[in-house]
Image (cartoon, helix red, strand yellow):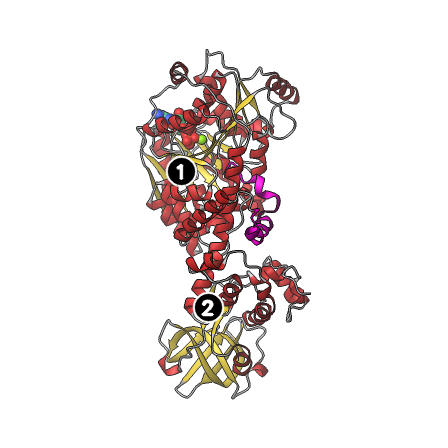
Amino acid sequence: MKSLQDSVQFVKGVGPARLELLNRLGVKTVRDLLYLIPRGYEDRTQMTPIVKLRLGDRATIRARVVIAEKYRAKGGRPMARVEVEDDTGRLICTWFNARFFKEADFPAGRELILTGKVDFYKIPQMVSPQYEPADEGAALFGPRILPVYSLTEDLNQTGLRKVLKVAVEEYAPLLQEFHEAKFLSERNLPPLTEAIRQVHYPDSMEQAQRARRRLAYDEFFMLETGMALRRRSLRHEEYGIQFEISDAVDARIRRRFPFKLTGAQERVIGEIRQDMAAPVPMNRLLQGDVGCGKTVVALYGMLAAVANHYQAVIMAPTEILATQHYETLCRWLADSRVRIRLLVGGLPARERDETRAAIAAGEADIVVGTHALVEGDVQFKKLGLVVVDEQHKFGVLQRATLRQKGRQPDVLVMTATPIPRTLALTVFGDLDVSVIDEMPPGRQPVKSQWYPPAKLPAAHEFIRQRLTAGEQAFVVYPLVEESEALDLKAAVSSQEELQRKVFPEFRVGLLHGRMRSDEKDRIMMEFRAGRTHLLVSTVVIEVGIDVPNSTIMVVEHAERFGLAQLHQLRGRIGRGGKPAFFLLFAEPKSDDAKKRLQIICSTSDGFKVAEEDLKLRGPGEFFGTRQHGLPELRVADIIEDFRLLRVARRDAFDLVARDADLSAPEHAPLRARVEETFKDRLDLIHVG
Ligand code: ADP
Ligand code: MG
């Protein structure tokens, strides 16, 4: 019996070699194969006569071989050249690096189907066109619209087309429809089997579009059904804590803040106050650009919990950041009775044990820490509020673990990776979303500019001026795992050189991720205290670090950073009310890299940066959906298909409202599909 769970090796045309290549694309079962969606199409219903070819067009022609030859280019590179003709003219095809080219495959007179971009050099040309013998191709596919798949090298288009032709014919009918016919026709969506057939071998481009729309809808629908189920189960959980935040408590908390809150901070605090007072556990995402002042909002919630005799915890992704939070809180709460504790991995064992004991005994009111909080066995006496800072740096499990250290505690997750609000509502469907969209007063927009590396000496001169004026600066190097040793060396030797040759009159520090954490802390403290003037660093300064006196950041090899990263880095400077400069040095090789640099220099609005980032990287990467325990989107595009997403969301929430556990008999196929999609992840779709 055939099944969609069959290994792809059972499909005709899949031998051991092709099996491995398919596996590399993540295709293991026949179902995976059917869901290998083409990235585009090639319209062979239209063969262009050679005489009608136009420069720059992508076209398909049918022509006979006149002569084929293999030769060596000047550098010794093997090249191939095939001249072809139809009844209207001649065309020359060229292949560079034609190592595997065999003249015998191109006997004079053989008819070929060739697809490629049209160029002209005396007569029409195509460079590296796709080709296949017309008899074979025509017999197989006929003059129709053919799929174009994204390939790994060696897996050729024609071969994959053949495999999919067979798979679609033999297996597509086995796909189990999970929507009712009426439901589909109301939304102008084709049945599943037809959609899979038409997405690979469409009868027309309209059909291909319609098929794609159905598959995109399905992805959204699954995503949103997961959200709806999760949200519903939350509402049914036992009651959370009802904190009492009287006006007196409110006033007492506010007296601790050394500045006047912005309107946006006020609004969000209002939302949190309401959530915390309500019986349903708070489950809120707070987003706001770097430097907008999220910490103080979190502190409000923590102090409200403490006023109610509960403990509060804030978890940050790095020790530096946790330490900084700890110090800020200690400063703001000096001379209060609130007991604050720091728990990070770098503590000496004895101190760590002692801190743990204090937390368990309820002798700590506010606990600040890193993932050390979720590793090992940290227990709270009475945990009421969990705050996760820079939530995207943590895995779903780490966040869930922290939450489970209390009984239905309120949860606030914070992120500086802004997501367009409507999208956030949709993608974090089970969270309430707050946004801080206003900067504290006195911020100067950071001037961002991009230069070739040759201009570095000029930047050094500029840095000298600012350092002389008493300001501070960063020089940032990339550090990635694959080339870690080399990257580290670059940063280390740059620090030496800057100190010795360029800025002997100043102190140049070095900070990188490979250092021991106490060492990192010491260096960061020195910089914050102004004892070091220039800090050479790898991206460990990325999140959260606050040094108001720093006004310049130079980023070397900026082409190697992602957009979000660059924006985060930029947020480190320009916090002190003086003009600030973000200077990027880069030699971008790819178009994407160029685009990233252009975007970052053209706007300082985090939401715009995020939107562009989303477009460049696609939603899967951007949201790290795997991390959220959400199904991956392969066909659907959150931006392009946003209207469809809204339809799917409404449908999914309606469905769950009517049949919360999908137990109605007519929902059986749908339920099976949902279970298959989420497996055991459904209870993890939570908290960002
Ligand atoms: P982020 O949202 O990036 O975590 P922080 O909470 O670290 O931002 O705040 C950035 C800086 O702005 C801090 O130095 C903080 O003390 C300051 N800040 C926050 N809110 C205000 C405000 N309302 N007025 C003035 N300064 C503020
Ligand atoms: Mg922060």
- Numbered disc 1: secondary structure: helix
Left or right? Give the position of 66 relative to 376: left
Please name whichever residue, 512 or 411, is drawn nearer the observer in this view of the structure: 411
Name the kind of residue labelled 2 in the image.
Answer: Tyr
Residue 677 on the magenta segment? yes
Q: Specify the quadrant of the image occupied by residue 251.
A: top left
Q: Specify the quadrant of the image occupied by residue 501.
A: top left
Name the kind of residue labelled 1 in the image.
Answer: Arg
Q: Which mark is residue 383?
A: none
Other-residue count near label 1 (Cα within 10 Å), few / some / many at <14 / 14–19 / ≥20: many
Measured as percent of width and height from the top left, residue 537 is found at: 49, 36
Residue 675 on the magenta segment? yes
Q: Residue furthest front?
A: 665
- Is residue 417 at least partly visible in the picture? yes
Q: Nearer the viewer, mark 1 or mark 2?
A: 2
Q: Specify the quadrant of the image occupied by residue 529.
A: top left
Q: Quadrant of ligand 1?
A: top left
16 in relation to 421, above or below: below
Please name whichever residue, 47 or 383, is drawn nearer the observer in this view of the structure: 383
Distance from disc 1 to disc 2, alpha carbons, whole Å, reads: 41 Å
The residue sitting at 43% across, 38% down in the picture is 568
Residue marked by disc 2: 41
Q: Quadrant of the N terminus?
A: bottom right
Please name whichever residue, 420 or 220, is drawn nearer the observer in this view of the structure: 220
Measured as percent of width and height from the top left, residue 553 is found at: 40, 37
The residue range painted magenta reads 663-688
505 in relation to 35, above or below: above
Q: Which mark is residue 570?
A: 1
Measured as percent of width and height from the top left, residue 435 is found at: 38, 34
Labels in figure, total: 2
Left or right? Give the position of 524 relative to 485: left
- Is residue 496 at least partly visible in the picture? no
